Amino acid sequence: MDRNYHVIAASSLFDAAPARMIPDSLAVLDRIRESGLVGMGGAGFPTWKKLSFGKGSDVIIANAAECEPLLEHNVARLRSNPGEILSGITLAMRQTGASKGIIAIKAKHTESLDAVRAALSAAGEGSSAFDIDPGIEIALLQDRYPTGDERAIVRDVLGTLVEPNEIPSKAGAVVINVETLLRLHQAVVERKAVNTKDITVAGEITGSGFGNDVSLVLYDVPIGKRVADVLDALGIRLADDARLLMGGPYMGGEITAEDCITATSGGVIIAGSEIQDEGPMGIIVCACGASEERLKAIVQEKGSSLCGVEFCKNAFRLPNGRLKCRNPGICPGQTQAVLALRKKGAQSVLIGHCTDCSNTVMQVAPKLGMRVHHATDAYMRAGGEHLIRSFRKTTVNTQA
């Protein structure tokens, strides 16, 4: 089932963002470029370039995984605007020459799935108000992190694992985030330039009149609006010890209320202080989760001393210094890392791992008397969600 969320139109909170229309005379790719559309799932790569580079691809995959916990704005849009998103997939297929379109979505998002199926059925019957390829398919994903990673989606949907330094085109695929596809439709069909962003506000949001077990989905927040203005409009007052994260609990970065909403903003997550642990504490860095810098900052916030740093065996460092996972979400085992930290004197361990890696840490560390913390803990507590500790693997019926 979907997490509970409440959709709010930003136009009810703020003055409408100044409209900029795209000339109707422009070709499709030129409209996309003129709109300023970039990947709105976080990467920020210009969409017109992605489609240009993707020419000759076999398939367009719509990333509807809603990978990070607490975030809901993509699945909310699939529920409320399935026709526009399917139109966006169709446009992307035509620009690249792809013969197939696939929506990759977790099986638990039942209401969004129902909306997509109804829109596809209408397209097949010729009764849709949108130009939609009726052959677009649905691929169901497991509810685990990092299901929404591009390479994980290509692996799980197409059965091909591309290397850490490769992109989905190596497997003949172009992966595009759901909101990006919505804005693509708006740019090409409605001729609207991109000047707003959907976001999720979650965590300590009781001042808004909603419980912490609800995410607030805001449609069309003006890009450039301060986070403080968004929270004020929702009636949310930050506690003295409040911390803000832009993005999701795993990969997000800490911000202040003075930071602004951008074209790649996903969530504004509010949490209180970290639970204290005198340590000594060791960290294990995973390419699928919080960075080494963020983990070290959390150790300090917990009042602990850092006694060691280990890396997941699947972490692969690119020439630019970034870490990428060799096989996202498939853990090689963390016993060696935990034992190494124990030998360095660690009484507790902090991880930012995918759900599968968290499983393997939990199989070892508690037996050694080590306390386990996860980088997402404060934000998951604030949002009324279970902490990331163990994960029971489930079987998904892939017949969508």
Image: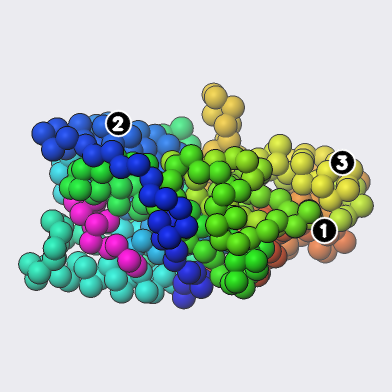
The overriding secondary structure of the stretch rendered in magenta is helix
Which amino acid lies under the numbered mark 3 shown in the image of this protein?
Cys
> Which residue occupies the foreground of this view, 168 or 67?
67
Could you tell me which residue is drawn at 20 percent across and 48 percent down?
190
Gap in Å between the C-alphas at discs 2 and 3? 45 Å
Residue 292 included in the magenta stretch of the image: no
**Element under label 2?**
helix
Q: Which mark is residue 103?
A: none
Could you tell me which residue is drawn at 29 percent across and 62 percent down?
81
Q: Nearer the viewer, mark 2 or mark 3?
A: 2
Give the colour scheme shown: rainbow
- Mark 1 touches mark 3? (CB < 8 Å): no
Task: Report the residue marked by disc 3.
Answer: 307
Direction left: furthest residue = 126
Q: Is residue 278 left or right of residue 123?
A: right
Mark 1, Cα crowd under 10 Å, few <14 / some 14-19 / many 20+, is: few
Q: Nearer the viewer, mark 1 or mark 3?
A: 1
Q: How many marks?
A: 3
- Mark 2 touches mark 3? (CB < 8 Å): no
Mark 2, Cα crowd under 10 Å, few <14 / some 14-19 / many 20+, is: few
Task: Report the residue marked by disc 1.
Answer: 275
Sequence-earlier tag: 2 or 1: 2
Gap in Å between the C-alphas at discs 1 and 3? 18 Å
Query: Does any portion of residue 79 appear in the rendered image?
Result: yes
Task: Report the residue marked by disc 2.
Answer: 49
* Residue stretch rendered in magenta on the structure: 79-90
- Mark 2 touches mark 1? (CB < 8 Å): no
Which amino acid lies under the numbered mark 2 shown in the image of this protein?
Lys
Gap in Å between the C-alphas at discs 2 and 1? 44 Å
**Element under label 3?**
strand
Q: Position of residue 238 (x, y in %)?
A: 70, 56
Which amino acid lies under the numbered mark 1 shown in the image of this protein?
Ile
